[in-house]
Image (cartoon, helix red, strand yellow):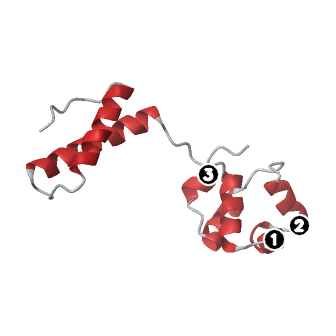
Amino acid sequence: MMDIRPIKSERDYERALGRIEQLMDAKPGSKAGDELDVLTVLVEAYEARRYPVCPPNPIEAVKFRMDQLGMTRKDLEAVIGGRGRVSEVLSKKRRLTLPMIRRLHRALRIPLESLVGTAA
């Protein structure tokens, strides 16, 4: 069993990843399985501190979802307003309003957290 310690450096991180790889087939509830669980928590905590994931820009989230759904700008008009408004929003010249955010959330099922970010 590995001497488990906090991950404080890239070297510690690489060592923990190597050990996790060795333990991937460990049975849950076994000593090796418990070690795998603890190391996984430590690695996730290190990655969250070292490599934080920023939420997407709200407009980029809208564009991504439109692409996923095969939507056009014209399709978006029914959700947030006329052609001019859609153009201004998608080009980041107009911020999303609260009513737009609500409609985008309902119609496109975009998480509110993605829509209420830092609008550029």
Residue type marked 2: Arg
Element type where label 2 sits in the image: helix
Is 8 displayed left or right of 60 in the figure? Answer: left
Quote the CA–CA distance across marks 2 and 3: 22 Å
Residue ID at (29%, 40%): 18
Question: Which residue occupies 31% across, 28% down?
Answer: 12
How many angstroms separate mark 3 from mark 1 (CA)? 20 Å
Residue type (three-letter) at the residue carrying disc 1: Glu
For residue 78, which quarter of the picture? bottom right
Rendered image quadrant of residue 62: bottom right
- CB atoms at circles 1 and 2 under 8 Å apart? yes
Residue 83 is tagged as: 2
In the rendered structure, find residue 77 and report the number of the disc placed on it. Answer: 1
Q: Position of residue 64 (x, y in %)?
A: 67, 61
Identify the residue at horizontal 42%, vertical 39% (top origin).
Answer: 48
For the N terminus, give its image quadrant.
top left
Q: Earlier in the sequence, mark 2 or mark 3?
A: 2
Other residues around mark 3 within 10 Å, as few (<14) / some (14–19) / many (≥20): some
